[in-house]
Each structure stands twice: as structure tokens, then as C-alpha cells.
Image: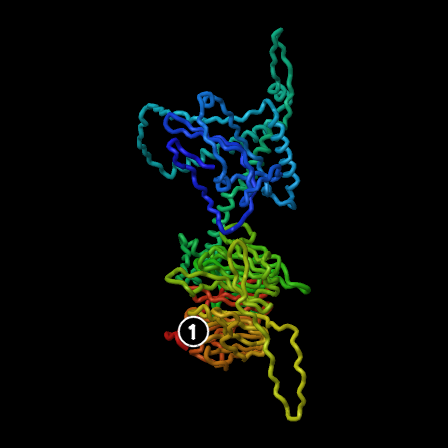
């Protein structure tokens, strides 16, 4: 098919597809009659093409072919063409052109799914979808449904102004004296007083004669028809019972109010400070004020002298009876020689104990790192069959008779420690292996975080835990803090405090085989496999300068020096004890030295670079449960051995302690703690008491190096 203009020029458009003449492709198609209108200027040209049928290359006609026709411009360029001029009738003829669209072919249709088929709400969602589909189907053929679009216009903003009178401010003042305050307080108490008086008047009115009662209780009733007088008898107990109920509700509201509880706590603290004032003054190392006895005249003086003599006489008799029974009053002054006064000694000030803790044993103690007057004590209860029911209490110097906070635990508490970054957080380890963090600011005894949901929690008792500052990667004062624990399952863990408590293992303590010497002629024996490959961790302590280094004591009697930088990296092993190691402690001043105590009755001084003991201290044949270095000297440390406490001063003697004192023959000492900023020592025993003892004549040497 070719297209020419009126000048005879060929203006046929070239096809976009250029076929390769070398490839022979047979195409068959039919050319239908087509009409083109070419307009140039005012004249038009009619171009018609008769229907022909061609075969691609040979030109043979195939009439009646059943194949679908295809149109190709290149296939019909050699066809017969006839050009006819259009007439006016042809131009005026109306031609209808119909444009149609083929049906949409759906190749893949996958509806979106927002809810799982296995979900609990799947049935309800499917039912709602079915209802929606039914509604859409009904809308399609309904006459009441019509789709329209509406555009809403925002209303024009309106401004309103209101004029008001100016506000006049005035300053007024008045003088108030203490008498005015008392009068106003008395005025506020008039209402309950008047209620009490009214109640008394009603009760007092019962003694009146019956005739007077009837006259007072007579009421006149009027009506429209006339005036009649009737007698209305009122029960006598109506008014008094109502006032009693009001008084009862008012008193219950006062007793249950939070303000009253807070006021009672403050009042209790004031009374305790008045009672313990001399002992608290001695604890804080301030002079004790003694109130002098002042008498008015001679008669009073003589009377007071006689009374004092009688009291002293009675007191001497009581003291003689106590001495015969073996009791000594610590408040009684005994005449001592100057040498005895200059000797180091201990005197008890008071004891943290109450009825709630009397049936428990003290397991651990820790001072708050910000408030030195706040002490946390862990208790555990020993039963013949099991160890259960523990307590974690927070005691304050303001009230030595009752703890400020009491946290009940399902199992015995074995370790406690306060956080330094968040001083209100108290970490608690229990005999069952769980770790909990409590907020001491809250009066709720529920744990802030708990390790019950952790899959990696300890399976043995948590014997010790500690908050440790992390030096790695910390610059300036931005030191992170981490919670470390050692447990009887042989693991040293670091706890991650997030939405819940979870831990990672830093070290797994393994048992070491003992090398036995062979005797001449003895045959080799097969070594027996241990029951457990992991050694039970009993205690640990972190280096005071490099917190990546720590010591770990085990039930085998070995002490391992480990590092946090590498997993299960043991830097050294110290073998010197023959029983479980109960405590290890770095020297805070000479940081290359550390102490260890064990169930083999000994306390050993070690050097970091030597695996052989430097000194061994053993005075009595009893277990050494706990040791601690003095925070004021590098030479002084204390140790508890059952019912006895020993204080050693290495600058004085390395063979005998400077103080050896029996605290309570009926109880065993379990833990020890030096007080901060004072010369006092805290001793916890197996009966639930924590005694505060003052140390005398124990001067710290000037040098801080051993």
C-alpha cells in the first residue's frame, strides 16, 4: 500500500520494523478494503485498495484460506493500486467508526492476606469479609446506591474579641504570732469537740424523767381541715448511734491515712535518736553530751543524795548477781590500769535485730555507696530438711530497732550489694540460684527485675555478687557498671540489665586432677572420674585498680586469677588451702597482695606474682568464715572464726592478733564488715543479729605499703 499526494509524490510512511531480506519467512494474510482520507489544501484524494490475497514470496493466490489475516505494509507494496477522486457525495457521506476493547486477561490473581489462617480471630475475620462481599454485591444492582464525589470546603476563620475590665492586683500583709497559730488550730478542733458534746448531751438526757422526755418528743401536726396534736415517739438510740458511726469512720480514716504513717515514722526516728544518742555520737566520733543534775535548794539536794545512794546500793547488788552468773554490763565503768586502757579493745554500741530476723542467719552485708547510713543485710533460714524463706532488709542509723525496707524472698538470701551508678538498686542473690534487683525507693516489696524468665540462669546457689565499674572503652566519668555473680554451678556470669535479666558466662571453673606420688614398686591405678567436671565457685573479688582482673575461690581449695578480656582465660592458680575457700580480698592499698580464708582453719596472705603463700595465720582450730581488709590501713584486717572475732595488725605482729574477742558463745559469726568513715566494725551472727562494735587504740600506721 502506497500513499501519494496531489503532486504525485510518494508519502508512504516507512515501517519501524525492517525485516532481514536473507531470512525467508512465509507469511500469509488477507488485505481488506481500507479507506484513507488525505487532505491537502482544499482538495481531497480517495485511495482505495481492493481485497487481494498474496503468499509471501511466490505470489500464488490461496483463496478460501482459513488462516487469520495479518497486515504487512511490505507485503502489499507491489499490489494493484487505483486512485479515484472523491466526489461531493462521498465527502458528505457519514462514516461510523466503532472503537472496542478486548476483555481483560487475568494471568495471576492472589488476594492479600493480613491475618494468619491459624490465628484465633481467623474465623471472625473471614465472617466479616463475607458480610462485606455480600454488601458490595447488593449495592451493585440496587437503585438506592449511587457513587458520587463530594468536596467539602473548610469554613472561613472568624476572629472574636472580648473586652473586659482590668484586673486589679493588691499586696496585703499581716503579722502572725504563735498565739494566733494556736488559736487557729484550736478552732479547727471545735467541730469534733462539739460532736462529742452533743453525744454527751444525748446520753446525759437519758437521766431525765419520763414525763420530760414525752414533753420534748411531742410534735404538733397541722392539716387543712383543722389542727390536731399527736405524740410522735422518737427512738432514744437514733441520734447517739449516728454520732458513733461518724466518729468511728473519722477515726478509721485518720488511722489509715498516709500522712499519719509518715508522721509516726518521723516520731519513731526522733525517739530512737534520743534513746541511742550517746551510742550514735560514739559511732560518729563526736563528743557525748552529759546533762548535769541541777537541784533547786538544800532540801532537794539532801533528798536527791539519799535517793542516789539507794539506787547505787541496789545497782551494786544487781551487778554482783550478774558477775556471779557470768554477765558483764558493758555500760558499767570498771577501774582499769593505764596499760589496759591503752590496749586495743572492742566495745559494743548496739545491734541491728528485731523479731522478724531472729529466726534467720546473717549471710551478707553491704553499705550503700552514696548514703553511708544505709545498710543492706541478707538473711537465710536454716531448716533441718531444706533452706528456704529469705529476707533482704535495709537498715538505717536513724532507727536501729526496725528495718526501713523489708523484701521477702522465696529462698534464702546469700548475697546483697548496692549499685554505684543507681544507688537505689539493690541486687540480691538467693540459695536457689536466682538473681533479683529491688528498688529501695519503692515501698512495694516486689522485685524490679528477676532472673526467673532467663534460660541461662544459675542452677546452684549464688554465693557472691557485685556491681563492678567497667573501665574498658570508658572515657572520663562515663564508666559503665555491670553486675557479676559467682555460683555453686561453677560459672562466673555477667548479668545484662535490660527489660529483663539475662546473663552471659565469663568463666566456667573446672576441676583439676590431683597428682599422687608413686611409691617404689607400686602399680599404676586408674584415675577415678569426678562426679562433676565443674568446680563449685565460692567467692570472688575484683582488682581495685584493674577491674578486668579478678580472683575466684573454689570448693577444692584453689584460687584462680582470671581476666574478663578473654573467655575462660586463667592467668594463674594458687594452691595452698586444703578446704573450700570462703573469701578472697585484695588489699586496697598494696594492690599486689590479697588474703584468703578457708575451712582448713587458716588465713593466707598471697602475692600476685608468686604462687606460694607468703604468710599463714592460724590461731584457733575453727573455720574462718569471713575476712576483710581495713579501709584505713594496709596492715589491718579482721577475720571471724565461729564465735570469735580476730583483728590482725601486721605492723605489730604476724604471729598473734592484736584483738581476739568472743562476741556471743551461743551464736556463730557468719560475716564481717568495716564501717565507712568511723572506727567501727559490724559482725553478723547465726541468730539474725548484726552487732556494731567500736574499736579503741587501733592506730593505723602512716605507711600504706606492706
Q: Please name whichever residue, 415 or 549, is drawn nearer the observer in this view of the structure.
A: 549
Q: Please name whichever residue, 308 or 666, is drawn nearer the observer in this view of the structure.
A: 666
Query: Picture coordinates of residue 363 (x, y %)?
Result: 56, 64
| Colour setup of the view | rainbow
Looking at the picture, does residue 90 appear above or below residue 701?
A: above
Q: Please name whichever residue, 471 or 125, is drawn nearer the observer in this view of the structure.
A: 125
Given the current orientation, which residue lies at the most extreme bottom position? 520
Left or right: 533 in relation to 331: right
Looking at the picture, does residue 5 appear above or below residue 161?
A: below
Q: Please name whichever residue, 572 or 71, is drawn nearer the observer in this view of the structure.
A: 71
Q: Secondary structure at mark 1?
A: loop
Query: Picture coordinates of residue 567 (x, y %)?
Result: 51, 69
Query: Picture coordinates of residue 693 (x, y %)?
Result: 49, 66
Left or right: 64 in relation to 175: right
Task: Say if residue 191 shows up in the picture.
Answer: no
Task: Name the residue at 61% across, 87% down.
Answer: 517
Left or right: 68 in relation to 551: right
Looking at the picture, does residue 114 appear above or below residue 37?
A: below
Query: What residue is pinned by disc 1?
Result: 591
Label 1, residues with CA under 10 Å away: few <14, some 14-19, many ≥20: some
Given the current orientation, which residue lies at the most extreme top position? 225
Task: Say if residue 106 shows up in the picture.
Answer: yes
Amino acid at each position: 500500500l502506497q500513499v501519494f499526494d496531489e503532486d504525485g509524490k510518494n508519502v508512504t510512511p516507512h515501517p519501524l520494523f525492517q525485516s532481514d531480506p536473507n531470512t525467508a519467512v512465509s507469511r500469509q494474510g488477507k488485505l481488506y478494503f481500507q479507506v484513507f482520507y488525505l487532505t491537502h489544501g482544499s482538495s481531497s484524494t480517495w485511495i482505495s485498495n481492493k481485497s487481494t490475497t498474496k503468499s509471501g514470496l511466490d505470489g500464488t493466490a490461496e483463496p478460501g484460506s482459513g488462516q487469520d489475516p495479518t497486515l504487512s505494509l511490505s507485503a502489499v507494496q507491489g499490489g494493484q493500486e487505483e486512485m479515484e477522486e472523491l466526489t461531493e457525495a462521498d465527502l458528505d457521506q457519514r462514516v461510523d467508526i466503532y472503537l472496542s476493547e478486548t476483555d481483560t486477561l487475568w494471568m495471576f490473581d492472589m488476594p492479600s492476606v493480613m491475618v494468619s489462617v491459624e490465628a484465633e480471630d481467623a474465623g471472625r475475620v473471614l465472617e466479616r469479609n463475607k458480610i462485606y462481599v455480600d454488601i458490595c454485591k447488593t449495592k451493585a444492582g440496587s437503585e438506592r446506591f449511587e457513587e458520587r464525589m463530594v468536596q467539602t470546603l473548610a469554613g472561613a476563620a472568624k476572629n472574636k474579641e472580648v473586652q473586659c475590665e482590668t484586673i486589679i492586683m493588691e499586696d496585703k500583709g499581716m503579722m502572725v504570732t504563735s498565739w494566733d497559730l494556736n488559736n487557729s488550730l484550736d478552732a479547727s478542733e471545735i467541730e469534733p469537740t462539739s460532736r462529742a458534746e452533743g453525744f454527751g448531751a444525748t446520753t446525759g438526757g437519758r437521766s431525765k424523767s419520763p414525763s420530760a422526755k414525752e414533753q420534748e418528743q411531742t410534735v404538733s401536726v397541722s392539716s387543712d381541715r383543722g389542727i390536731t396534736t399527736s405524740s410522735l415517739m422518737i427512738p432514744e438510740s437514733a441520734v447517739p448511734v449516728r454520732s458513733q458511726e461518724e466518729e468511728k469512720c473519722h477515726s478509721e480514716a485518720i488511722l489509715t491515712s498516709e500522712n499519719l504513717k509518715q508522721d509516726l515514722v518521723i516520731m519513731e526516728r526522733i525517739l530512737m535518736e534520743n534513746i541511742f544518742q550517746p551510742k550514735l555520737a560514739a559511732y560518729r566520733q563526736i563528743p557525748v553530751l552529759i546533762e548535769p543534775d541541777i537541784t533547786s535548794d538544800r532540801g532537794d539536794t539532801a533528798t536527791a543524795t539519799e535517793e542516789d545512794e539507794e539506787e547505787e546500793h541496789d545497782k551494786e547488788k544487781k551487778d554482783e548477781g550478774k558477775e556471779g552468773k557470768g554477765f558483764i554490763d558493758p555500760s558499767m565503768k570498771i577501774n582499769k590500769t593505764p596499760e589496759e586502757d591503752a590496749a586495743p579493745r572492742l566495745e559494743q554500741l548496739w545491734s541491728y535485730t528485731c523479731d522478724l530476723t531472729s529466726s534467720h542467719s546473717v549471710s551478707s552485708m553491704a553499705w550503700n555507696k552514696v548514703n553511708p547510713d544505709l545498710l543492706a543485710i541478707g538473711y537465710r533460714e536454716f531448716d533441718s530438711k531444706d533452706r528456704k524463706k529469705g529476707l533482704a532488709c535495709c537498715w538505717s542509723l536513724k532507727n536501729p530497732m526496725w528495718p526501713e525496707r523489708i523484701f521477702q524472698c522465696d529462698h534464702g538470701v546469700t548475697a546483697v550489694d548496692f549499685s554505684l551508678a543507681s544507688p537505689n538498686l539493690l541486687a540480691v542473690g538467693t540459695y536457689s540460684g536466682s538473681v533479683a534487683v529491688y528498688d529501695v525507693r519503692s515501698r512495694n516489696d516486689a522485685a524490679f527485675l528477676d532472673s526467673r524468665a532467663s534460660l541461662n540462669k544459675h542452677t546452684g546457689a549464688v554465693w557472691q555478687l557485685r556491681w563492678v565499674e567497667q573501665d574498658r572503652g570508658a572515657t572520663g566519668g562515663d564508666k559503665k557498671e555491670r553486675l557479676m555473680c559467682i555460683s555453686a554451678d561453677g560459672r562466673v556470669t555477667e548479668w545484662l540489665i535490660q527489660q529483663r535479666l539475662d546473663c552471659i558466662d565469663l568463666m566456667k571453673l573446672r576441676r583439676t586432677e590431683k597428682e599422687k606420688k608413686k611409691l617404689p614398686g607400686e602399680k599404676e591405678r586408674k584415675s577415678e572420674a569426678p562426679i562433676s567436671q565443674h568446680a563449685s565457685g565460692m567467692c570472688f573479688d575484683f582488682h581495685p585498680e584493674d577491674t578486668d582482673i579478678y580472683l575466684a575461690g573454689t570448693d577444692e581449695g584453689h584460687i584462680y586469677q582470671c581476666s574478663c578480656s578473654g573467655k575462660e582465660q586463667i592467668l594463674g592458680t594458687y594452691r595452698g588451702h586444703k578446704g573450700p575457700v570462703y573469701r578472697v580480698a585484695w588489699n586496697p592499698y598494696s594492690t599486689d597482695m590479697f588474703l584468703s580464708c578457708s575451712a582448713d582453719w587458716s588465713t593466707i596472705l598471697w602475692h600476685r606474682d608468686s604462687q606460694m603463700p607468703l604468710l599463714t595465720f592460724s590461731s584457733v582450730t575453727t573455720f574462718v568464715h569471713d575476712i576483710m581488709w581495713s579501709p584505713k590501713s594496709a596492715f589491718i584486717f579482721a577475720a571471724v572464726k565461729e564465735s570469735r572475732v580476730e583483728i590482725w595488725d601486721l605492723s605489730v605482729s604476724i604471729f598473734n592478733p592484736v584483738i581476739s574477742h568472743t562476741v556471743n558463745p551461743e551464736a556463730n559469726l557468719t560475716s564481717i564488715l568495716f564501717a565507712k568513715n568511723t572506727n567501727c566494725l559490724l559482725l553478723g551472727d547465726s541468730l539474725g543479729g548484726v552487732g556494731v562494735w567500736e574499736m579503741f587504740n587501733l592506730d593505723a600506721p602512716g605507711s600504706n605499703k606492706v
